[in-house]
């Protein structure tokens, strides 16, 4: 009985009978000798002869056709709702919202882990779907064109969500036009019965032709939508708003900060509604939502200050949203923003423009002290000074210790600190700050 599939050495499970697809010709089959319980699928007769393997070997005419045939057969054997979520930001939170709502409803939910997404992990997540699975919730990321297409081919999501498209992943996509096209791959192999949930307020989403999609659901705050939020207000512990659907208004509340989380909540409610969940019931369950760590997570800091940790990831839309939250909740306190660079933007003019744009947001937010944590994000500080920020209020700190020292001297009970830098830098810098700043 075969109970596992692998295409890489790292995916082989020593404790399971594994079907190994020799997709990569650079992989030498002789390296598989040390593994037990393998059945090898290959189209290379020469490898079979020269490596003298003792494993069972299946020779196929086309290895990729054989692999995708099995993947499609496995996925189609499960008649369950599969939610596929993509967007520049908000994917992980929306995935968690849907997963937690369905779990509270008593469903057995399989989902991607934290923010670990991308085609290299697709096979692992697909194999986690079993006869006991009631629903699957997949966060679909991309680094380059073609990534989303592959993920849609694997999971064949029947409820697809496109949250937003901002500036990101220009290293792999090079231009914004290519990035928008890459996000449009969420439409790949979409069927007439599949449902597509779109953000009506996103100008870049409007550039995608969805005229051929039969079932479209729109969410929004500013534009008219099928699921719309209005009367958005901050409370001490979250955000309250009215959800409007088919002229009926529902009072709603979600824990945590950020107007962007209203979009995430709208998408989640719209998604579970498609499989028959009552709106009031899903709103009630979302009121108990638990955010993942480092997603606008509040802490009490030393000297009585307040700290917001939003270091899980760093994209231009996410930084803008975090600055908006800082402005909304500061309540007259002195604002300190600890900002870092955007990964995967490359060195393009677009990247420079994004850093300059963040400087305008820093000024509009009313940041009192700006701390830049690396050389790549210097443009934020330079442009903020051009826009009128006092030179003495901008600090360039390129080591963890410099950042920690500088922030520590600024903290009082009347200060609130936003930590917003790349997850790549997070492990070292955040741990240093956590030791010195958080009480």
Image (tube, helix red, strand yellow):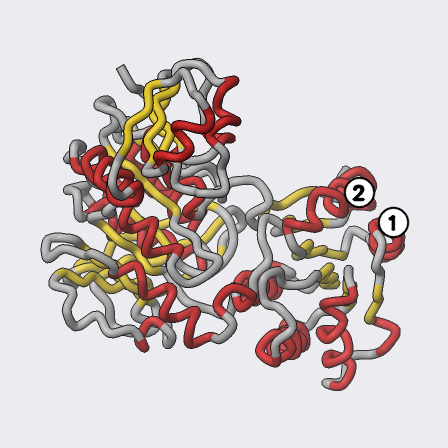
Classify residue 152 as left or right of residue 335. Answer: left
Confirm whether residue 364 shows in the render: no
Q: Secondary structure at mark 2?
A: helix
Dot 2 or dot 1: first in sequence order is: 1
Q: Is residue 434 above or below residue 14?
A: below
- Tag 2 near tag 1, CB within 8 Å: yes
Q: Name which residue lies at 20% across and 63% down.
A: 226
Q: Nearer the viewer, residue 2 or 359?
A: 2
Res 401 label = 1
Confirm whether residue 405 shows in the render: yes
> Where is residue 99 shown, x and y percent of the image?
34, 37
Q: Nearer the viewer, residue 130 or 250?
A: 130
Q: Nearer the viewer, residue 410 or 167?
A: 167
Q: Quadrant of the C terminus?
A: top right
> Where is residue 258 shown, x and y percent of the image?
50, 57
> Where is residue 160 shown, x and y percent of the image?
26, 53
Badge 2, how many Cα within 10 Å: few under 14, some, many 20+? Answer: some
The residue indicated by pointer 2 is: 432
């Amino acid at each position: 009985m075969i109970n596992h599939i692998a295409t890489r050495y790292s995916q082989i499970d020593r404790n399971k009978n594994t079907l190994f697809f020799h997709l990569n010709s650079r992989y030498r089959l002789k390296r598989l000798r040390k593994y037990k319980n393998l059945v090898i699928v290959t189209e290379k007769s020469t490898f079979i002869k020269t490596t003298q393997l003792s494993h069972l070997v299946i020779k196929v005419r086309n290895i990729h056709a054989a692999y995708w045939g099995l993947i499609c057969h496995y996925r189609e054997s499960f008649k369950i709702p599969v939610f596929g979520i993509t967007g520049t930001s908000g994917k992980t939170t929306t995935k968690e919202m849907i997963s937690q709502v369905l779990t509270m409803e008593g469903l057995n939910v399989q989902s991607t882990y934290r923010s670990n997404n991308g085609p290299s992990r697709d096979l692992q997540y697909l194999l986690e779907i079993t006869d006991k699975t009631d629903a699957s919730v997949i966060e679909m990321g991309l680094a380059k064109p073609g990534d989303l297409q592959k993920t849609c081919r694997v999971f064949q999501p029947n409820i697809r969500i496109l949250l937003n498209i901002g500036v990101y992943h220009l290293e792999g996509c090079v231009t914004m036009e290519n990035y928008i096209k890459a996000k449009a791959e969420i439409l790949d192999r979409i069927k007439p019965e599949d449902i597509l949930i779109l953000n009506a307020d996103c100008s870049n989403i409007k550039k995608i032709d969805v005229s051929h999609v039969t079932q479209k659901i729109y969410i929004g705050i500013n534009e008219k939508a099928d699921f719309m939020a209005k009367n958005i207000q901050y409370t001490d512990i979250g955000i309250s708003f009215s959800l409007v659907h088919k002229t009926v208004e529902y009072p709603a509340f979600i824990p945590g900060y950020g107007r962007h989380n209203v979009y995430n909540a709208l998408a989640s409610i719209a998604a579970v509604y498609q499989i028959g969940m009552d709106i009031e019931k899903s709103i009630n369950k979302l009121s108990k939502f638990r955010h993942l760590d480092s997603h606008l997570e509040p802490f009490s800091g030393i000297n009585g200050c307040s700290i917001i940790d939003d270091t899980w990831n760093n994209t231009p839309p996410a930084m803008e949203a975090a600055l908006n939250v800082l402005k909304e909740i500061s309540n007259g306190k002195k604002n300190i923003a600890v900002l870092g660079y955007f990964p995967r933007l490359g060195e393009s003019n677009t990247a420079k423009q994004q850093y300059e744009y963040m400087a305008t947001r820093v000024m509009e937010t009313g940041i009192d002290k700006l701390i830049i944590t690396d050389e790549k994000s210097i443009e934020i500080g330079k442009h903020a000074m051009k826009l009128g920020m006092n030179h003495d209020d901008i600090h360039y700190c390129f080591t963890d210790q410099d950042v920690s020292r500088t922030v520590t001297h600024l903290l009082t009970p009347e200060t609130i600190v936003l930590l917003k830098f790349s997850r790549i830098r997070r492990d070292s810098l955040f741990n240093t700050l956590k030791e010195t700043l958080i009480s």
